[in-house]
Image (tube, helix red, strand yellow):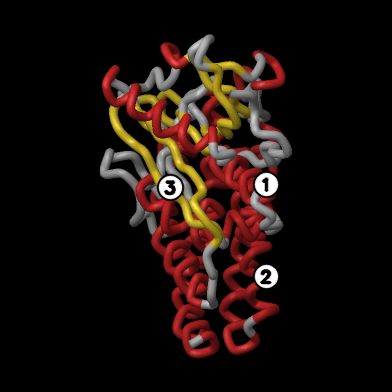
Amino acid sequence: MGRIPGIELAPNWTSAAAALEGILRHAGIDLPRHAVMGLTGHAFHFCLGTREGVVALPSGPSSFDRAAMVARYARTGLRFERFAGPADAATKERAIAWAAERLDAGVPLIGWDLHLHEFGIIDGYDRARGGFFVQDVITEQVGPFVAWEAWAPLGEIELWAPVEPVEAGPEVVVEALRTAAALLGGEEGPADGQPRGAGGIEAWAEALEGTAEVDRAGNAYTLAVLAAARTDGAAFLRDLAGALPGAAEPLAAAARALEEETKALAPLITLFPFPSGGHGNVQVPGLRRAAAMALRRAARYERECRGAIEGAIPLVEAETG
């Protein structure tokens, strides 16, 4: 088959949300980025990528509860289905057949680990060449084709396909706020031992205060993803505060906390710019200590935000119920 026309990856540091927004627009659902981020929980996610003593690995932003995404993405007004499994030959063959059936019907997919270890859009395939056509953050540099034999090098198949539009009633706001509180508290995600939520940001600060190895590029990337996500989270909460006067005070307080967090993070984006990571800055003790202080402030604002959201939830339930 050829490629499904009229679909584009949206600009977003969170690659799964970038793919989701592109698919939503293709389906005629035009939500602003901060609404997509807030409703799905991506605006409130944080994981400190950690492995074998190295922290701030670039894998952190994509480490989240993928099984939960089917239900969370439905909050945007589009129901999804999922194919997931190990990337062994038999499972990959079933996954390709599953994907081809939907692509033949004109249904684009969200896929994981295509050109790189991030999410992207799959908008077609070429059986003769043996691969998918994809859109991700490096497609412009390397082209759209990903061979099936090279797909999913991390050994994990993850595909999400839109099924049908669904009614997203006021209950999705309460669900989204509960998700936000859990994510900010580090209570959501795979049980892999990686620090999450406000505690994850404090663990990042602790690593910088000590002598732990901090991945230069991953440190810069994680900062960029976090700052962009919290900016969207603040905008989402501001919108809710304006729409729900009965819960406006705690929702506005939650938004202010995230706005202050992004201010605390802003100097670090300059200190550790992506993709260079600030070259040797991450090895300089004085700069590490300064960054740790900023991250500890950010973690405090995360906790303030969570507390305000928890205070808002019963008020939102009363207003929307």
Whichever of callouts 3 and 1 sits on the residue coming sooner in the sequence is 1
Q: Could you say whether the residue bearing mark 2 is in a helix, strand or loop?
A: helix
Residue visible at 61% across and 82% down in the picture? 249
Please identify, in this view, whether the residue under mark 3 or under mark 1 is nearer the observer.
Answer: 1
Check disc 2 and give the amino acid type: Arg
Check disc 3 and give the amino acid type: Glu
Please indicate, yes or no, whether residue 56 appears anywhere in the rendered image. Answer: no
Whichever of callouts 2 and 1 sits on the residue coming sooner in the sequence is 1
Q: Which mark is residue 238?
A: 2
In this rendered view, identify the residue nearer to me: 9 or 190: 9
Q: Which residue corresponds to mark 3?
A: 202
Is residue 256 toward the left or the right of residue 299 in the image?
Answer: right
- Quarter of the image where the N terminus is located: top right
Residue visible at 53% across and 75% down in the picture? 169
- The alpha-carbon separation of the residues under discs 2 and 1 comes to 27 Å
In the image, residue 309 above or below residue 184:
below
Q: What is the total number of numbered labels drawn onto the structure image? A: 3
Residue visible at 29% across and 17% down in the picture? 89
Q: Could you say whether the residue bearing mark 3 is in a helix, strand or loop?
A: helix
Q: Could you say whether the residue bearing mark 1 is in a helix, strand or loop?
A: helix
> Which quarter of the picture shows residue 245?
bottom right
Residue 209 location (% of width, % of height): 45, 36
Q: Which residue corresponds to mark 1?
A: 26
> Which quarter of the picture shows residue 319?
bottom right
